[in-house]
Amino acid sequence: MRQVGVIGVGEYLPKRVLTNADLEKMVDTSDEWITTRTGIKERRLAAPDEATSDLAIKAAQKALEDAKLKPEDLDLIIVATITPDMQFPSVASMLQNGLSASKAVAFDISAACAGFVYGITIAQQFISCGTYKNALVIGAEKLSGITDWQDRNTCVLFGDGAGACVLSEVKTGGILSTYLSCDGSKMDLLNMPAGGSRNPASHETVDRRLHYIKMQGNDLFKIAVRSMTEAAEIVAKKAGLGLEDLDLIIPHQANMRIIMAVAKKIGLPEEKIYLNIAKYGNMSSACTATALCEAVKEGRIKKGDKVLLDAFGAGLVCGACIIEW
Ligand code: UT7
């Protein structure tokens, strides 16, 4: 089996910034509540004419440049998203065309906030067994389009963005272990009820505001802490490492209190946790993707470092992987 690693990263965040002060004018909330309960100060919003594929392609181009590859070098494109431009075709097909990656096989995956880690895991399988050589994995979301801007329970949490990485065979280091899980019995805690085959779009579904994210945050909070802690422990054990051997943790950025509770449980200090929640909020699959890119660009990840990606989200899904840089 070939060893697989990340050879390039890229990200794109839309320009428009929505601050907590802006939200105070939209719903009954306060900067104090949002900051203390979530750790979020601001988030980015895509322009009305910007779709998920537009964010994704910009992140992808940067990742390809970073990897020093041309689009035609790509064999596989996986886009993790819950906010595709349309039901079909896939965002990945749009990217294959937009990038002119004519040789690449392309598909989307729906694994919500754990989508980027699910995507990395799938790509690793294809490369390690020799089916494909170079893969592009992207986490991209325009959550602002499915956020109910009248619901203070959810609208303060989400933002838009995209992060990408290129995976290929590496001589040293690379992905040491991966772990994926799913508990569909609790899928009702976080969903968007309409727009699919169960409740196709109709005047009634629009009137009932069913095309927006519905979330039972409090129940999810406890499960998120438990699941992300368990995933970190399992994936470290699979890699033959102790948690203390990890150099950086890149957690899903849903809530600062969730992240700190996980860090405490696995016994790691704050300086080993990468955070971008304050400036971007929860961007689902794009959280770990952009955070990985920023951590590399900021020099937080050095050669030989062991980096843990740990994500949890709707499904309920969990995904973790350890990459030696
Ligand atoms: O992305 C992956 C999956 N998502 C998650 O993992 C998210 C997990 N959940 C959370 O992050 C947190 O549960 C939330 C941030 C969503 C909510 O925080 P909480 O500490 O669990 O608050 P709560 O839902 O228990 O609400 C506490 C109070 C309520 O008022 P009452 O009923 O106690 O009077 C809410 O109505 O806070 C109120 N509240 C707000 N107040 C001001 C809820 N949202 C707001 C708001 N501004 N934006």
Image (tube, grey):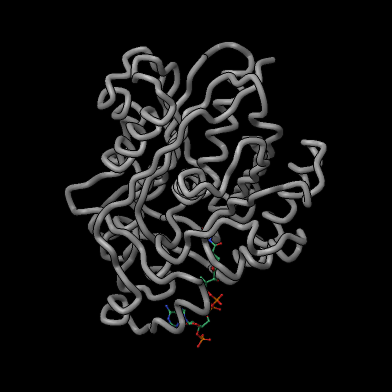
In the image, 247 versus 299, the foreground residue is 299
Farthest left residue in view? 49
| Residue 16 quadrant | bottom left
**Residue at the location (62% across, 49% down)?**
310
Against 233, residue 98 (above or below) is above
Residue 294: percent from the left, percent from the top? 46, 48
Task: Inspect this view and state whether residue 292 appears.
Answer: yes
- In the image, is 297 to the left or to the right of 85? right
**Residue at the location (34% across, 41% down)?**
84
Residue 295: percent from the left, percent from the top? 51, 48
Against 148, residue 33 (above or below) is below
In the image, 233 versus 210, the foreground residue is 233
Q: Quadrant of the N terminus?
A: top right
- How many discs mark residues in the rendered view? 0
Q: Quadrant of the C terminus?
A: top right
Residue 203: percent from the left, percent from the top? 23, 58
Against 220, residue 85 (above or below) is above
**Residue at the location (49% across, 47% down)?**
112
In the image, 171 versus 160, the foreground residue is 171
**Residue at the location (76% across, 43% down)?**
236
Task: Inspect this view and state whether residue 180 appears.
Answer: no
Residue 31: percent from the left, percent from the top? 40, 81
In the image, 215 versus 49, the foreground residue is 49
